[in-house]
Image: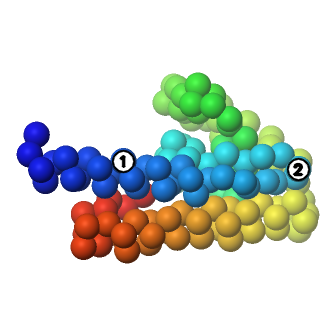
Amino acid sequence: MNAAQTEEISDIHAAMIAYDRSGAGYEWQGEPIHWSERHHWLWLAIARASEQTAEQDALAAMWVGGLETPDDIRAIERRWRRDKDSILDELSEFYGGFYKNDPAVADAVAVFYGAIMADIDASNNELADTGPGGEGVPPK
């Protein structure tokens, strides 16, 4: 492995650390919300496949963020690959517990779009500023 490859791997590792660090301390309805790169990939797959409103996207993020361990995420990813409809049905049931103007929905939007996404952007900018010349840091 040459020096450029080693540096690139180091940058990728740093980006993953910053991304995971950005997920600390979120809470929704008194429960911790976990957010890592794996959570984000799962949420992104669900959001892209389901054509949801912003409120539903935020609630889906809270549902995904409720998954605590890598094994929990892998189990949902396996189910998603086998039967997307079962996951979408489960999410539909989850959404059914909320009214569109429910304060919990507004809080989900604030946590996801206001806190999680802002922290991810901030951690990415931090790496870009401190990385070698600000270049070569992969997007998260």
SS for callout 1 = helix
Crowd band around label 1 with a 10 angstrom C-alpha radius: few (<14), some (14–19), many (20+)? some
SS for callout 2 = loop
Left-right relation of 26 to 17: right
Left-right relation of 41 to 3: right
Task: Examine the image and state in which quarter residue 100 appears.
Answer: bottom right
Q: Which mark is residue 13?
A: 1
Report the residue at 83% width, 46% height from top.
31
x then y, percent, for residue 105: 82, 62
Report the residue at 48% width, 56% height from top.
18
Foreground tag (1 vs 2):
1
Residue 54 in sight? no
Above or below: residue 71 compared with residue 125: above
Residue 119 in sight? yes
Q: Identify residue type, mark 1.
A: His
Q: Which mark is residue 138?
A: none
- Which residue has dot 2 on it? 30
